[in-house]
Amino acid sequence: MSNQFIKKVAIVGGTHGNELTGVYLIEKFKHDLSLIQRDSFETITLLGNPKAIKAGRRYIDTDLNRCFKPQYLQNHQLTYYEQIRAKQIEKYLKYQEVVDVIIDLHTTTADMGISLILNDSHPFLLQLSGHLCYLDPDLKILQYSTNSEPSQLRNLAKIGLAIEVGPVPQGVLKADIFHRTEALIMQILDYIQNYNCQQITNIPKNLTLYKQVGVMDYPRDENNEIKAMIFPTMRDYQPLKSNDAIFIDFKGNTIKYQGNSIVYPVFVNESAYLEKGIAFSLTMRETMMI
Amino acid sequence: MSNQFIKKVAIVGGTHGNELTGVYLIEKFKHDLSLIQRDSFETITLLGNPKAIKAGRRYIDTDLNRCFKPQYLQNHQLTYYEQIRAKQIEKYLKYQEVVDVIIDLHTTTADMGISLILNDSHPFLLQLSGHLCYLDPDLKILQYSTNSEPSQLRNLAKIGLAIEVGPVPQGVLKADIFHRTEALIMQILDYIQNYNCQQITNIPKNLTLYKQVGVMDYPRDENNEIKAMIFPTMRDYQPLKSNDAIFIDFKGNTIKYQGNSIVYPVFVNESAYLEKGIAFSLTMRETMMI
């Protein structure tokens, strides 16, 4: 990718139908394309899950952003609405429009501030991340485990990233979250423009990444019902060490973290992950040279 | 009601299936009934909308907490799940268990702190509210318009109230919100016990009520799509006067409040009200002698 121009960028909103920031940003961009146009590349927009957006729900049949594993995309016996929609989106972004970069817009109910989510260590993504952290030191870079085949929409392009902003409840459009997401999109588009023009500046030598290493489910009873809540002091991106309180059960008993190394929880109290058996994700913090 | 004992109290959770605080409080109480038992009256519990709780949604077909108008309850041609469920609940709480008091547990995505919602000015409710405000000066008393026939579950009993706590996203169980709601329930049950024993103390002379006087919808375009967001400085229960900013459109233009009197918005950014055409409710603040 280095020394290679970026020709087409896709901005996607509403991959989850009740994450309204992305939905309304796409509507805004559609009404004024000049906002996302840059001289050296084309930008297109897409609403990921129109049916779920209309219904005001995360999804209709299944989570669209887990439908993009190549094996799923090739399997024509998968006929849930989102499984069919994933194939349409693959065709559109991969073979029709052939995008080089996907920016997928998400929100979270967790108090995570603003994060970029990457699936790999593509040098372009690391340098972009470094530049964006230089512009906004509060920005966090979250890297998902790449052990298994990635299943998210952003992986349809060689360079895929998600913007994740919170806290905002599902089904709510908050002006501050909207503006913060929009500003980050503009910074990314400007960076790509400068990259194409070989005018990149302000890339620090080091980048701090939060690498996902696992997930933690709620304590559950014999009927699989949750029997504790996340401890109120738990904070996203704050270090968690052995014997720190992580849950409190309904009787008031504290459950402590048992682990040998310091970890950094993310997606603490993410509404959509309750059904996935995830109370929060665990990451390791790592600073690398880029 | 004065000089009359209260014999039976119902605590209801999960009237909205994705408001988890009430759902899990009911589960907790079911496992340890001694928590809600008092000598002078009986307390029963109920999960309002089991099917919606299981689905993790506010409702299946329609908002259960708008199905309790007498005319709806008498109409057997209304066959949505919630319309049928409302009739079952009416039968149970009004004719089978015959409860005197209903405490309906709700949460909101709005940053409203903790509120009691009343539908009328029953002297018992006003004195209870005064006592609870004495115990917690941060508690707000919200009175809904009584112009029309009330449609909420709490109106099945002569004394009905809702506890409304936020901010918490739908589908999220937060320990601090859970504990705050539980503490308020205990204060209400203790008050009823003391009332029955004619040992009521600590009722202030005055009570401040926020009386709902209207609702404000989002600005919308010709396709009925919202074209602005709530202005970031808008706060629940904070005075709003003429020319204060209330919305910001997607281009950054501010829309100002045009009203002659000071009002106090509530349910600012309540997720479930977007589909009802409500950006926030407007209340008038009034202090009355009780």
Image: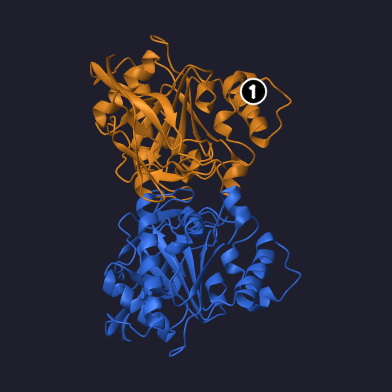
Chain colours: A blue, B orange
Quarter location, residue A286: bottom left
Q: Secondary structure at mark 1?
A: helix
Give coordinates of residue B272: x percent, y percent.
Answer: 50, 41
Q: Nearer the viewer, residue A69 or B260?
A: B260
Q: Residues within 10 Å of mark 1 (few under 14, many from 20)?
A: some
User: Could one spot residue A157 in this view of the protein?
Assistant: yes
In this rendering, position of residue A3 left or right of residue A16? left
Residue at 46% x, 18% y is: B146
Q: Nearer the viewer, residue A101 or A214?
A: A101
Number of marks present in the image shown: 1
Give the residue type at disc 1: Tyr
Farthest residue toward the right?
Answer: A77
Pointer 1 indicates a residue of which chain?
A: B
Give coordinates of residue A88: x percent, y percent.
Answer: 67, 68
Farthest residue toward the top?
Answer: B3
Asked if residue A177 is positioned above or below residue B141 in the image, the reply reads below
Q: Nearer the viewer, residue A95 or B123?
A: A95
User: Could one spot residue B30 in this view of the protein?
Assistant: no
Quarter location, residue B66: top right
Residue at 63% x, 42% y is: B60
Give coordinates of residue A71: x percent, y percent.
Answer: 67, 78
In this rendering, position of residue A78 left or right of residue A237? right
Give coordinates of residue B204: x percent, y percent.
Answer: 23, 19
- State which quarter of the image contains the C terminus of chain A: bottom left
User: Circle 1 is placed at which residue position?
Assistant: B72
Quarter location, residue A280: bottom left
